[in-house]
Structures are given as C-alpha cells and as structure tokens.
Image: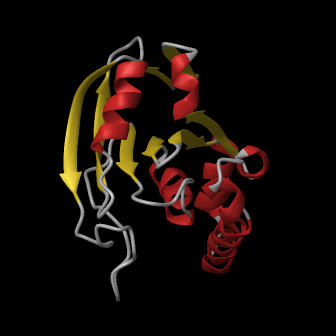
C-alpha cells in the first residue's frame, strides 16, 4: 500500500498528540496515496498533565478500522505490542504519532498468513515476544535511538518506517510503500 505523508501531515499529527490520552482514527487515501479525509476519536485520560500514568489506567483508544489507521502515544516512542498485533489481525497500515516522531508499519502477507493459521498458543507466543522485545528496546526508543527496534520489527515480519520530527526540516514528502 502506498501512503504519502507531507510535512503538514506530520506536523498535524504532532500537534494533535495530547499528553494525557490517546487520539486515533482512520485516514481515507486516494489512488495516489494522498490523505483525503481524517476521522478522529478520543480515548479516556490515562496520564496526568505532567505525563504520569494515572492509577489503574492504560493508554488506549478505540476507533473504527480502515485501510490506514492512526493513533497517538502520549509518552511511548514506539509502536506497542498491541499495535503490532492489530496490524497483523486487521491487515492494514498503521501510523503512530509519538513524542519524537511518526511510525508507519504494516504486517507482511507472510506474517498475516502465519497468524491466521496459528493456534491460540502460538498467537500468545507472538504477543509475548512482541511485548518482551518492546520492553527490551524501551530505553533506546525513548531516547531517540530507534535503529535496533526498527531492525527487530523488520526481522519479525513487518514493513516499517520511522520519521523523527528532526528529519522534517530536510524533506517535505515521504512516499511510504508498506
């Protein structure tokens, strides 16, 4: 799937990203991959104004499914294991706006097929591995060092691109083929 992100798209996602909850939605895109419509849904508060996780809360947002889905992360600078799982089960492209940049990813058809034919135990192992590896790379990704996590996500069977906000001064359009 082709998705075109402009500097304006990335800035809009960055500015929309609240620090106290997640936002999410879907993008409609035309045949050229250009965003033509944005749907927005809000999640419940999960962090206080300083970014501290509220007791008993997790950051999440429920929104309609579509070919290109997006959401924000108030604090984490990487896709979560749930984000990866959702791309495998939904066979769609995901865009996540984080504090330091924008991630775009999609599960490869081989991984989608493996997931579809997997039993409950194998699916549980997938989810546990994705969660464990996310935690392994948490410190690095929170500090902007995404190379190790990017390599692992690619090796795990995903097409993935990361656009740090610092790169948007050097380029105006990203043609993503996921």
Q: Quadrant of the C terminus?
A: top right
- Asked if residue 127 is positioned above or below residue 112 in the image, the reply reads below
Which residue appears at 25% of the width and 51% of the height? 64
Which residue appears at 20% of the width and 39% of the height? 39
Q: Is residue 24 visible?
A: yes
- Asked if residue 109 is positioned above or below residue 126 in the image, the reply reads above
Which residue appears at 76% of the width and 44% of the height? 147
164 or 117, which is in the foreground? 164
| Name of the residue lying farthest toward the front | 50
Please state if 156 lies on the left or on the right of 86 as rendered: right
Please state if 151 lies on the left or on the right of 7 as rendered: right
Q: Give the x, y percent position of residue 75.
A: 46, 60
Q: Give the x, y percent position of residue 34.
A: 36, 16
Which color scheme did the rendering employ for the protein? secondary structure
Please state if 62 lies on the left or on the right of 53 as rendered: left
Q: Give the x, y percent position of residue 146.
A: 70, 47
40 or 141, which is in the foreground? 141
- Asked if residue 53 is positioned above or below residue 15 in the image, the reply reads below
């Amino acid at each position: 799937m082709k998705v075109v992100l402009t500097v304006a798209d990335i800035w809009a996602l960055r500015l929309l990203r609240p620090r106290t909850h997640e936002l999410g939605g879907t993008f409609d895109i035309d045949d050229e991959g250009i965003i033509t419509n944005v749907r927005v849904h809000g999640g419940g508060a999960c962090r206080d104004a300083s970014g501290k996780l509220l007791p008993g809360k997790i950051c999440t947002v429920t929104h309609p499914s579509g070919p290109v889905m997006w959401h924000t992360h108030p604090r984490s600078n990487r896709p979560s294991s749930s984000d990866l799982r959702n791309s495998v089960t939904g066979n769609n492209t995901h865009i996540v706006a984080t504090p330091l940049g924008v991630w775009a990813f999609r599960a490869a058809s081989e991984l989608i097929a493996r997931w579809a034919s997997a039993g409950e135990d194998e699916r549980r192992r997938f989810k546990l591995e994705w969660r464990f590896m996310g935690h392994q790379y948490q410190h690095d990704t929170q500090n902007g060092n995404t190379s190790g996590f990017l390599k692992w996500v690619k090796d795990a069977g995903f097409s993935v691109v990361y656009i740090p906000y610092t790169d948007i001064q050097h380029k105006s359009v990203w043609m993503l083929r996921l």
